Amino acid sequence: MFRKRLIKALQSISVEIPNKSMISLVGESGSGKTTLGKILVGLVMPTTGELSWENTVVVKDGRIVQKDFYLSNRHKFVYVHQDPYTALNPSKNVKNILEPVVRKYKKHLSNADRFKYIRELLEEVGLVPAEYFIDKYPHHLSGGMRQRLSLARALITDPHLIVADEVVSMVDPSIRVSLINLLKKIVENRGTSIMFISHDLGAAVYAAGDNPMYVMLKGLVVEFGPASEVIYRPEHPYTRALISNIPVPLVLSERRVRGLDGVMESARNPNVSSPCPFSEMCPLLDSECSSLTPGSYLRVGPDHYSLCVKAGKLPKWRPSWLPASPG
Ligand SMILES: Nc1ncnc2c1ncn2[C@@H]1O[C@H](COP(=O)(O)OP(=O)(O)OP(=O)(O)O)[C@@H](O)[C@H]1O
Ligand SMILES: [Mg+2]
């Protein structure tokens, strides 16, 4: 029971986050999304590989390099927790949650200016009127409001990158769109980059738009490209399965679709072994799949890549509910 088991949480992954944009990362539970997000902000040390911030390598093969740069920039790369209920200290009110962080990162502000700054921050994240929220405790706030407060706290360091990990998963579907819109506003007004992590494909596509979306499975990125391309022209059987199961509400229609629209209907082929993370469920598995090398992608469109060896030659497919593609 207590025997050690080695889990490779991530392998052969390369992600680049463009300045001033929101990208998204999707995949089922345990696919490695949080691990990747935490690596990007320096909260988890990868055993191999490189992490660069602003074109400066800060982590290499399990060690911090450029220590001074790393320490002086660490606060610019922040992680917003998926659970707003545990991320906030229940014994502190809004003012006391934000004020120590403002004191630390905005040392130049006088007492009066600090209060004004906190008020503006609350208004920016949609907690208005600020006077009403300033002395509230986390238990007075709804899940969406708590998530807004977590974001307000994250903004105090004027971050270059926010890793927003499942920030909409614990809130009411009706609040999700407004929270994603808030993230879009932060990108637009502040020039912050955001990595939006979600297992909800609809939310992820709405968040990223034409920006990159990465689809993960079992520690590997199986497909990436502009989110709108990936959803209309998926070139990996796993992405197709995910899209067939999309709980649509945000982008496409109100109809919730169950089942995999034929993607995974056939039985798997037990005679073929492949490093493909989808091989155990993929109906298209055959001897060609043995040649797959994790990390080598096929280009299937402008900036659009798939890990499937059959990418570009996959059978024609579209889920029955998907409206006609715009392009
Ligand atoms: N601290 C840890 N110790 C051991 N294994 C871990 C640890 N953290 C994550 N893992 C494993 O690493 C893999 C990836 O986990 P991770 O939390 O990154 O997935 P995820 O995609 O964020 O999942 P979820 O959607 O449930 O949040 C899983 O197999 C998980 O069990
Ligand atoms: Mg996670």
Image: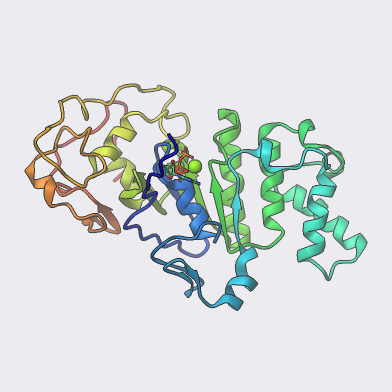
Where in the figure is residue 175, as x and y percent of width and height? 61, 33
Q: Is residue 50 above or below residue 95?
A: below
User: Left or right of 95: which side holds 284?
Assistant: left
Q: Is residue 207 visible?
A: no
Residue ID at (79%, 66%): 106
Question: Which of the 4 image quadrants contains residue 295?
Answer: bottom left
Q: Is residue 204 above or below residue 120?
A: above
Q: Is residue 61 above or below residue 1?
A: below
- Front-lying residue, 37 or 191: 37
Where in the figure is residue 85, as x and y percent of width and height? 68, 35
- Front-lying residue, 44 or 284: 44
User: Left or right of 134: which side holds 309?
Assistant: left
Residue ID at (32%, 46%): 230
Q: Is residue 61 visible?
A: yes
Where in the figure is residue 27, as x and y percent of width and height? 39, 41
Question: Which of the 4 image quadrants contains residue 231?
Answer: top left
